[in-house]
Amino acid sequence: MDVLLAVREWGETRWLARLRPLLPDREILTPETLKDHASVRYGLSWRHRPGEFQKLPNLLAIFSLGAGVDHTLADPDLPNVPLVRVIDPDLTTRMSEWVALQTLLHFRQFSRYDRQQREKVWAEDEDQAAAHEARVGILGLGVMGMDAARKLQTLGFDVSGWTRTARKIHGLTAFHGPDGLDELLERTDILVSLLPLTSETRGLINRDLIAKLARDGKIGGPFLIAAGRGGSQVEADSVEALKSGALKGASLDVFESEPLPKSSPLWDLPNVYISPHNAGVSHPNAVARYVAAQILSFERGEPLQNVVDRARGY
Amino acid sequence: MDVLLAVREWGETRWLARLRPLLPDREILTPETLKDHASVRYGLSWRHRPGEFQKLPNLLAIFSLGAGVDHTLADPDLPNVPLVRVIDPDLTTRMSEWVALQTLLHFRQFSRYDRQQREKVWAEDEDQAAAHEARVGILGLGVMGMDAARKLQTLGFDVSGWTRTARKIHGLTAFHGPDGLDELLERTDILVSLLPLTSETRGLINRDLIAKLARDGKIGGPFLIAAGRGGSQVEADSVEALKSGALKGASLDVFESEPLPKSSPLWDLPNVYISPHNAGVSHPNAVARYVAAQILSFERGEPLQNVVDRARGY
């Protein structure tokens, strides 16, 4: 009933310290301390080395230690057992905090007032738009997208969303499919991407998509707010759009290469806010509790929760 | 049935342009163009010159063009007619935007990540607190305080409030009176002041009050977020607290002297965000519509809305 923790370069020691008290009656092993491959029933993955789970004949399930599973599915030798992802109110709340903060930063012209403060200038924009005049478009209406949508609506924003398959959502304009995406973009001042990384979303946010965003809005946009996965964006296109003015600002939490290289022009572009892929990081304590609780309930005969559909990719 | 507009140094020409189409059948005069004092029925005030409304024998009502009326009540010769203040969903929404933005800036350690961005450092705080671990205390539970409280609750914060008189509020811990203020402060990591300026609130936010704020919280506070009126704060005490670390950061929209003088140390203090008294500025178009609508409904025989209790001061 052992557990294999495979979290390349991501706080292995701290994960062990969190997990052991929660699962006291079993061994938590790492690829380095693993001896008896047949003893392992559960794999815990964060960017594990491809093939690491392949030689475990009695593996029952794999848990991704984050909301995304693209890093786990990237392993071509991933065993065909249930793959569980984290869906956790704590993570969802944090992601919505970040989305609300970034939306408000752009909407309330933070960089203008920040510059004025540095220059000791007292001046206000008497034409500051009202929230209902700011059209926010959310790509991805899963648990996180919906939570962000509802909170932005509470703050007064005019929110729409786009989702893979048609869905009727009370009180929210939801578009779907390729045509729906164009419809969303042309009425969007602030684009919020919370998409998982799949074959369908890879490179979706590119020059063509940015060109379709609204330029007739009252808030001087368009702006891009991106969390989720860096692979959904063509980063060079975002840089070009920010330089040309096709985008008036951005908040980026995810990048094609992480950590973002020091050579990236994004660090220095005006009205761009960079965060180190921590928009919606769940507290590791909460993730550890979630995984331990799932293992224990699974062993009592209950079904695993939040199992990934591998064909869909999330 | 004329209207006297007395808005010292605050866009007189633009106010005239907004009001005239809304009240086409009457004269909108300024102190400079006023000739027939007996013709004026309504006064519109923003920091009007004391005495300006005194010589209007047929004055029926005075409208403050903002939520606060301290600037109007400061006139010792203010005629004893109903004084109306602006309570407007647009203004309330904007104030809550600002409160949410500033709360999130401090809570999500914006200044840390901003500094890291300038230094091109990729590093996250793995112990970032959850919103429910951040205790926000709101001073003033009027229309604006309640709206901000509800929105901060939606974002996940642990919100309490303090109000002048005892009040039972569903789902919100509300303290009142001097003892209640101390109770609120000792459980507050982020203090949000939305108080009107009255004899009771003048200088309330001073060194003693700051000393009572919680220092055992998980978010590294305490922080002060102040809108409303600068007179509610002893600014020198805030400066000292920010320098000594008694306050870990602040967001200040109002000041004892406005515009904030270039000599003020507040401009340069770390983790302090200055805005030019525009946290909850209603769009002047909305204020003009509000005032015009009240004048017209009053003349149809309906009572004036949001009349100030002069003894209470708001």
Image: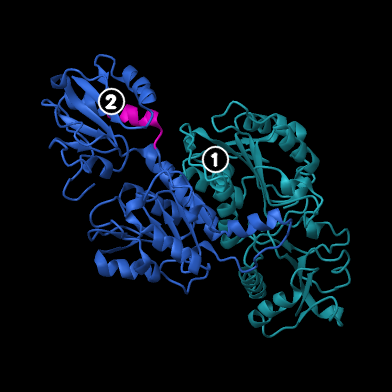
Chain colours: A blue, B cyan
Q: Please give the range of residues in magenta.
A: A282-293
Disc 1: host chain: B
Question: Is residue A285 part of the magenta span, yes or no?
Answer: yes
Question: Is residue B253 part of the magenta span, yes or no?
Answer: no
**Residue A231 horizontal/vertical position (percent):** 32, 52
Disc 2: host chain: A
Q: Which residue is at the far front?
A: A263
Q: How many marks?
A: 2
**Nearest the eye: A84 or A236:** A236
Q: Which residue, given by chain and number where applicable, does mark 2 sit on? A: A292
The residue carrying pointer 2 sits among few (fewer than 14), some (14 to 19) or many (20 or more) residues within 10 Å by Cα, namely some
Image height check: is A207 above or below B253? below
Is residue A157 at all visible to an observer of this figure?
yes
Image height check: is A181 above or below B197? below
Identity of the amino acid at label 2? Ala
A148 lies left or right of B104: left
The residue carrying pointer 1 sits among few (fewer than 14), some (14 to 19) or many (20 or more) residues within 10 Å by Cα, namely many
Q: Quadrant of residue A158?
A: bottom left
Cα distance between the residues tagged 2 and 1: 29 Å
Callout 2 touching callout 1 (CB < 8 Å): no
**Nearest the eye: B206 or B194:** B206
Q: Secondary structure at mark 2?
A: helix
Point out the image quarter for the N terminus of chain B. Answer: bottom right
Q: Quadrant of residue A160?
A: bottom left
Q: Which residue, given by chain and number where applicable, does mark 1 sit on? A: B107
B37 lies left or right of B187: right
